[in-house]
Amino acid sequence: MQVEILDALTDNFMYLIVDVATNTAAAVDPADAEVAVAAAARLGATITHVLTTHHHYDHAGGNNQMKKLCPSVEVVGGRGENVQGATREVADKECLQLGDAVTITAIHTPAHTAGHTSYLASAPSSSSAVFTGDALFVGGCGRFFEGGPEDMCETMRRLSALPREALVYAGHEYTVKNLQFALEVEPGNSAAQQKIQWAEARRASSEPTVPSTVGDELRFNPFMRVAVPEVRAYCGAADDDVTCMRRLRNKKDNFAGSSRPWVPGGGPLPGL
């Protein structure tokens, strides 16, 4: 299995998942259909599936064009999500096959939207990879537009249960600001400190900060750490996961971040 990272719009990621033996591919959230199809052609791969995480235009807006460019493509979306151009709706834990070797499992990951679906791709002799759209970012998560903190707690439980080594391919390049917030929540988190310095260096070189891993996210992503005492203390001594998640998201929604680099030992600098 091969994963190709593609840029779209201003800060979106699209992906191609390729079954190398058969040169068949699935395009994940191909908002720019022409770019996705051209990338597949460069790889010598044929796109047989579109995997749509949710119905927002910056993720599903290229689906109809994908159907024009690849007339036999199967456009997949979560059950009840009503994504543009869908030819198949999948339920939680439903599987589909890509080529001979790649199995893709749908994971219902609501909160950002009601039917938001992540996709776990697995193949022999390859690291598994989960494509999380706007459910899970590197160091963060998406806003709660059609769900609430209860939904996001369930989403994070499902994603936390994946293998620690599973690669995480998120829908946006939001890593630096997310980690600035993570360090406001847990200033002493050494994993977050190391990750933000790495992420700032990557962005300075115009390189993406994906993929992460499930194991790494559990070490520094506050939205996967709502049971950790330091995170609960930041959220006003919240005594349950849902209350902590609600307060954490509210604080993140009002977090400005900084355009200046994080300073070791000093946390994120204030102001834009």
Image (cartoon, rainbow, N blue to C red):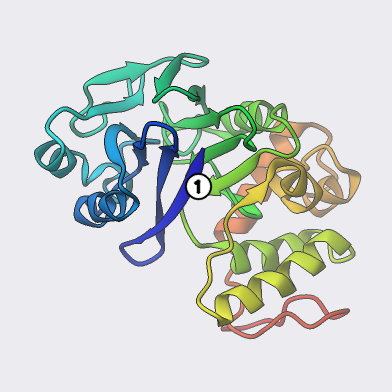
User: Is 256 on the left-hand or right-hand side of 33?
Assistant: right
Secondary element at image label 1: loop
The image position of residue 217, as x and y in percent, is 72, 47
Q: Height in image: 246 above or below 14?
A: above
Question: Could you say which is closer to the camera, residue 161 or residue 239?
Answer: 161
Q: Quadrant of the C terminus?
A: bottom right
User: Is 48 on the left-hand or right-hand side of 12?
Assistant: left
The image position of residue 262, as x and y in percent, is 73, 79
Residue 145's quadrant in the figure? top left
The image position of residue 30, as x and y in percent, is 30, 47
Tag 1 residue: 143
Question: Could you say which is closer to the camera, residue 239 or residue 146?
Answer: 146
Mark 1, other Cα within 10 Å: few <14 / some 14–19 / many ≥20: some
Q: Residue at x 34, y 51 (%)?
A: 43
State the residue lying farthest toward the front: 21
Residue 184 seen from this side: no
Label 1 is placed on what type of residue?
Arg
Q: Residue at x 54, y 33 (%)?
A: 148
Residue 187 seen from this side: yes
